[in-house]
Image (cartoon, rainbow, N blue to C red):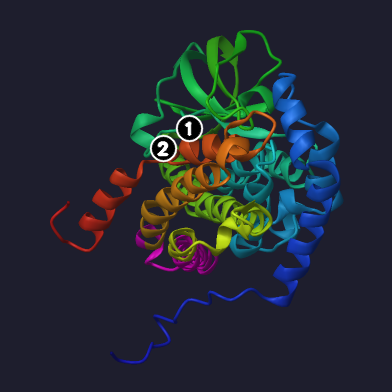
Amino acid sequence: MSAPTEETQAPDLLYSEAEDDLRAAVRSLLAGRCDAPTVLARVESDTPYDPQLWRALAAGIGTAGLLVPEKLGGQGAGHREAAVVLEELGRSVAPAPYLTSAVVATETLLALAALDGPVVELLGDLATGRRIAVLAVPFAAPAPAAAQPAGVVAGAVQGMVTGVADAAAADVLLVPTTDGLYAVETGSAGVTVEPLVSLDLTRPLATVNLAGAAGTRLADGASAVSAVRRGLLAGAGLLASEQLGLAEWCLTETVRYTRERHQFNRPVGSFQSLKHRMAQLWLEVVSARAAARNAADALATGSPDTPLAVAVAQAYCSKVAVHAAEECIQLHGGIGMTWEHPAHLYLKRAKADSIAYGTAGHHREAIAELVELPAP
């Protein structure tokens, strides 16, 4: 194999010192304000979002503006740093609208052809955590074509979108329509957000009803489709980092528990069959880390192989996260089946993530098309 040329540099999969420092700050915050008992209590009370946690995460540490250039009020960092934040959010299954607002909505706005007044103002608000925006598409939508159920009649937005993640926490909805992309305030007349009974209670879904809602047109049809496509691509790519963090927690917690749990006067983790299962899971998690980091690096560098890197990461990481969560529950035995243990939160998040922004099967089909091979 020939050495990488200047045009095709090898991806950097290692974490920088700045990324390690960011991880430490986010992990410390989540350990103090979003530990397992806290998350369990919040989801059981039907109020999963913690405004104080979001302010500390978004504004206090400055993670909401990682993707936003400094001239627009952000941190001017990139997707690698955002991926580190999502790893930690996945590790704690934190109910925070970071993926939907600070990644997907923000990336959609940044991809617009014209960064003018309303767009710049909204980006500044998102970067500082003052406001939360959500792209009004189904969480399972893999492409912009599946994300344009709304229309515009006499300048007002009409339509219904179901399965929108974090819509209940949003201040602004970015609504793709047949006429372009509109920003609609959730508190304005004609906007109704109806919560759904979601599998993953840490990332609630909702149905958004728009009945003649007033909105600000941010882009025309062609520009809107391109921007939504970019937002969903970034969301899928960095979702892999969330799935990685989730899988790492499940593996670490399972290893810890099987060392402490004894049967026949021996730690259950010393049984050969369980050793093999955890070793196999470790190999999967290591591979998932490589795939997720490759996707984040491709997004950060604007690599022409970004669609392929994202598809590979999602096709692999979604399955690893589900497997890790399933093994975590099973190897914890009876305690793993209880509501008091957080393992079920990780399985539900992993299952919900596995169909977000396209299923593994959808991404495998994308890989086949990109490399011009027959689809499985």
The residue pinned by badge 1 equals: 139
The residue lying furthest to the front in this view is: 264
Pair 1/2: label in front: 2
Dominant secondary structure of the residues highlighted in magenta in the image: helix
Q: Amino acid at mark 2?
A: Ile
How far across and down, in percent of the image, does residue 214 sit? Answer: 61, 15
Q: Is residue 139 left or right of residue 132?
A: left
Q: Is residue 51 left or right of residue 277?
A: right
Query: Would residue 131 be visible to someone looking at this image?
Result: no
Above or below for 373 versus 13: above
Q: Amino acid at mark 1?
A: Phe
Quadrant of the drawing holding the N terminus:
bottom left
How far across and down, in percent of the image, does residue 116 sit? Answer: 64, 44
Q: Residue at x 66, y 22 (%)?
A: 168
Residues under numbered marks 1 and 2 in contact, where contact means CB atoms less than 8 Å apart: yes
Question: Toward which corner of the image does residue 174 lie, by quadrant?
Answer: top right
**Labels in figure, total:** 2
**Label 1: element kind:** loop
Above or below for 219 versus 25: above
Above or below for 328 versus 339: below
- 181 or 254, which is in the foreground? 254
How far across and down, in percent of the image, does residue 173 sit? Answer: 60, 27
* Label 1 to label 2: alpha-carbon separation: 8 Å
**Label 2: element kind:** loop
The residue pinned by badge 2 equals: 355
Q: Residue at x 57, y 56 (%)?
A: 268
Query: Would residue 348 be visible to someone looking at this image?
Result: yes
Please tell me which of labels 1 and 2 falls first in the chain. Answer: 1
Above or below for 282 versus 329: below
- 173 or 182, which is in the foreground? 173
Q: Which residues are magenta?
A: 281-308
How far across and down, in percent of the image, does residue 44 sit? Answer: 71, 22
